[in-house]
Image (spheres, grey):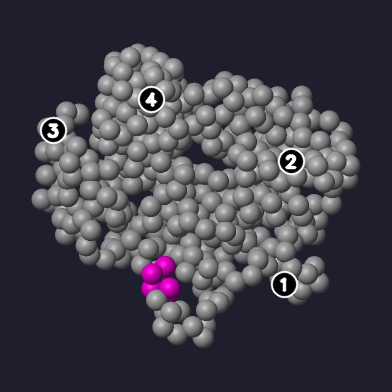
Amino acid sequence: MSSSASRLSRRQFLGASMTAAGAMAVGPFGTIASAQFGGPLPLSDLRPSGALDESYWWKVRSQFNIVDGLAFMNNGTAGPMPRVVYEVNARILREIAEDPKDNYRNEQANESREKLAVFMGADPDEISITRSTSEGMNVFAHGLDWREGDEVLVNNHEHGGGLGPYRTLEKRRGIKINTIEVPSPFESVDQIVGMYRSAMTPRTRVIMVSHMPYVTGTVMPIKELAELAHSQGAMISVDGAHPLGMLDLDMHALGIDHYAAAGQKWLLAGTGTGVMYIKKDVQAQVWPLMGAPDEPRPGSSKYERYGQRNAPSAAGIGTAVDFHSAIGKKNIEARDRTLGSRLRAGLKEIPGVKLWTPDDAVLACGLSLFSIRDIPMANVVTAIRDHGRVHIRTMGTGNLNAVRASTALYNMPEEVDQLLDAVRYVSENASKYMTSTQQ
């Protein structure tokens, strides 16, 4: 779509939908902007009542206060709160400041737990509200009774938040970490499951795997890996930093033992929020990370003994679930897949671009990793920001030199095209950006 046609379509939309969508505007550089005034729409207004066309997604976009003219595509690090979540956080913070007698707000936290359980396909006593994915990964890893020589199976694209506790256990308990070198991109589910099967030994106690490795954004075959682990008498722990709020998750259907997820990324619940699932049948094997073991705490709430919780965040994460539920989990996943496919299809057409994320609608969703003619990744990020005012991030691990873009529910097709235009410009002018210090 040309920039003039894109602007025209926005004007047409704004003229027809200003009231319903909550006062949106077109910022500089031809990107979408939400006006910085007015409260959130009632969540009932976000429930689809017809076709999920771009007018509908414009209405969703209007519920974010993203700065005018910025195409924000780094949701994989931290996403913006929608207005309804922001306002719940602000209201509770204000209420506690005015009347601090009830500063625990346990009832609201328990309401959030109930909502998260339904949203994630779990029972409420299998859900713990944490402060991050890393905390959830540490609870499980350090909660098991390890013996010297026990093994954990990981791959070379795991995040330090999930891998870190096992490195500590390697030093403190004498466990062994076995690492699989996974290809990028990989070819099929069978290829990956086969690699894990070949790497398992009689001493393998846990498969620790990211549902979507933060490096490539590949959707790993978690259900199949869970079946493999259990067939060998092992457990499976999943680093789910990205899928919550992106994919239509069902913990019971996946058949996993443990899942740690982030609130600040695709769930859009703000920083310092997270969720942990531990299957009811295995909780007796997982000690709490904090607190006394004989404290009478029911189910997974025993894993929340970390002191004073942030009451606004605990309530706000439930409101984030309400926001996603109003739109619909399946609708959000379809939107994220559509935008991601649009980006990856466009990247494949640009000379000099290498795509590291699988070119498969099943194996990829809202994260896309690519590189441009061996240009230093920091230069690529800066050039794309300066040329198109699109914010993405660097992504290096080992000798990888690449950048990662997130396509979330508040992004629009025009923003994807805006990123592709910037990538094309950088590739065509690669000599300008090859030096360590950009010219």
Indicate the quadrant where residue 160 lies: top right
Pointer 3 local density, CA inside 10 Å: few below 14, some 14–19, many at least 20? few
Give the CA distance from mark 2 to mark 1: 30 Å
For mark 2, what is the residue?
A: 167
> Could you tell which of marks 4 and 2 lies nearer the N-terminus?
2
Q: Which residues are magenta?
A: 89-93
Which is closer to the viewer, label 2 or label 3? 2
Residue kind at label 1, given as amino acid type: Arg
For mark 1, what is the residue?
A: 297
For mark 4, what is the residue?
A: 437
Query: SS at mark 4?
Result: loop
Q: Position of residue 288 (x, y in %)?
A: 74, 61
214 and 47: which one is in front?
214
Query: SS at mark 1?
Result: loop
Q: Residue at x 33, y 16 (%)?
A: 430
The image shows residue 195, relative to residue 139, as above or below, that is: above
Pointer 1 local density, CA inside 10 Å: few below 14, some 14–19, many at least 20? few
Q: Position of residue 5 (x, y in %)?
A: 13, 33
